[in-house]
Image (tube, coloured by chain):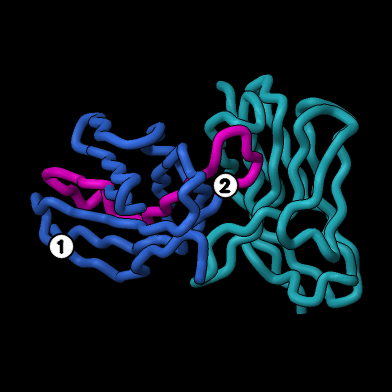
Amino acid sequence: QKEVEQDPGPLSVPEGAIVSLNCTYSNSAFQYFMWYRQYSRKGPELLMYTYSSGNKEDGRFTAQVDKSSKYISLFIRDSQPSDSATYLCAMRGTGANNLFFGTGTRLTVIP
Amino acid sequence: DGGITQSPKYLFRKEGQNVTLSCEQNLNHDAMYWYRQDPGQGLRLIYYSQIVNDFQKGDIAEGYSVSREKKESFPLTVTSAQKNPTAFYLCASSVGTGGEQYFGPGTRLTVT
């Protein structure tokens, strides 16, 4: 079983839709959770960084962590064509050097 | 402007040749990392360095080597011993090993 599982998609939504992206994980030691956005042939860009359980909001983006279910989500409200990219989840334990990444979900927002 | 630069963007090599990928950062970060990205596999850690003149192997270090002689620079050499070198290589840095990692634009290496 992989440490982090992420549905690769692809996911296509109309402009203005609410998008939900998800990852599950198996290691209960993970405490720090991240979402990265990666445009085609570019490096990943850090979008959200959260610690432990709970919600964090930044503009149209909300990151949610449910440690009891080992499940994290990224919600994008009022999605725009410029949101079309691959979204990667990543996580690590306290004091750990390694980040564990999901395989990424490719999102297309159709105008 | 602070950031991470990687060069070149595209690199082509013949099988059996060693090749060195450049990574430079001016963020004053102590920790630097090299990842490899393959389709459908996510990012995998090759090497990381927490401080100058020190580095550790990641999950897939075989066939790769690194050096960290300066805080700003963390070059990666892909040796001829790496069986499947064609991939997208990403360099990252963070304030400390537990901090948020920021990525460079990547180098796409093709070996034929």
Where is A79 relative to A10, above or below? Answer: above
Asked if labels 2 and 1 touch by Cβ distance under 8 angstroms, the answer is no
The quarter of the displayed image where residue A9 is located: bottom left
Q: Which residue is mark 2?
A: A99
Residue B68 in sight from this viewpoint: yes
Type of amino acid under label 1: Val
Q: Residues within 10 Å of mark 1 (few under 14, many from 20)?
A: some
Coordinates of residue A99 in the picture (x, y in percent): 57, 47
User: Which residue is painted at 42% across and 57% down in the image?
Assistant: A25
User: Which residue is painted at 35% across and 62% down in the image?
Assistant: A105
Q: Which residue is mark 1?
A: A13
Q: Which chain is cyan?
A: B
Coordinates of residue B42 in the picture (x, y in percent): 52, 62
Question: Under tag 2, what secondary structure?
Answer: loop
**Inter-mark Cα distance, 1 to 2:** 29 Å
Please state which of residues B33 and A98 is positioned toward the viewer in this rendering: A98
Magenta-span inclusion, residue B103: no
Question: Under tag 1, what secondary structure?
Answer: strand
Instruction: Please report the bounds of the magenta region as a residue range.
Output: A74-99
> Which chain does tag 2 point to?
A
Type of amino acid under label 2: Leu
The quarter of the displayed image where residue B16 is located: bottom right
Give the color of chain A as drawn: blue
Coordinates of residue B19 in the picture (x, y in percent): 85, 59
User: Which residue is painted at 51% across and 55% down in the image?
Assistant: A101
